[in-house]
Amino acid sequence: MPKTLLYRLFGVGKMPAEWRSTIESEGIVLFDEGIGGSITYRDFSAPGRRSSWRKVAFSGSIALTKTRLLALQYANPAINVPLDDSRLKQMQFSVEGEDKLVVVFNANLFHNDWSGTIEYRFRTKQAREFLKSLGNRSDAA
């Protein structure tokens, strides 16, 4: 899977050094950076924001360590869930095509004053490996 143009030109979507050292200390299982991604909001509501449907593309990175799932939208955490967190079991993981990891969850899973559905898509050649590892880990508790 080719890296995004923003990554190739400017390094946008690269895992920042502080996050990189954190995930290395936790033991990296799977990792990809400079990948294309998108976030889709469906019937979404949050203080000051409403949207029946909205999709935003980004360049980012994703990592699965021995202790957490971390996905960054640009350099900002989009998903940061410890593997022993009960919320991980409420997230739905799937693969679209051969190279797209999909993560779907209810918006109020992380913010009590949000509602609707949030869908993240990460374009990585390791999509099936992420799905297999997350399925094994989220079902194992």
Image: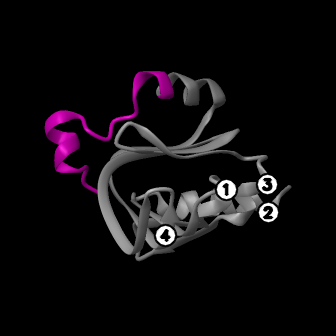
Q: Secondary structure at mark 2?
A: helix
Residue 6 part of the magenta segment = yes
Distance of mark 4 from mark 3, alpha carbons?
Answer: 23 Å
Distance of mark 4 from mark 1, alpha carbons?
Answer: 13 Å
Distance of mark 2 from mark 3, alpha carbons?
Answer: 10 Å
Q: Amino acid at mark 2?
A: Asp
The residue range painted magenta reads 1-19
To which residue does mark 1 refer? 112
Q: Earlier in the sequence, mark 1 or mark 2?
A: 1
Is residue 18 visible in the rendered structure shown here?
A: yes
Residue displayed at 31% across by 62% down: 56
Is residue 137 visible in the rendered structure shown here?
A: no
To which residue does mark 3 refer? 86
Residue 8 appears left or right of 23: left
Pick the quarter of the image with the N terminus. bottom left
Residue 95 higher or lower than 36, as above or below: below
Which numbered disc covers residue 44?
Answer: 4
71 or 117: nearer the eye?
A: 117
Q: Secondary structure at mark 1?
A: loop
Tell me where residue 101 appears, x and y as whole percent: 48, 64
Q: Residue furthest front?
A: 48
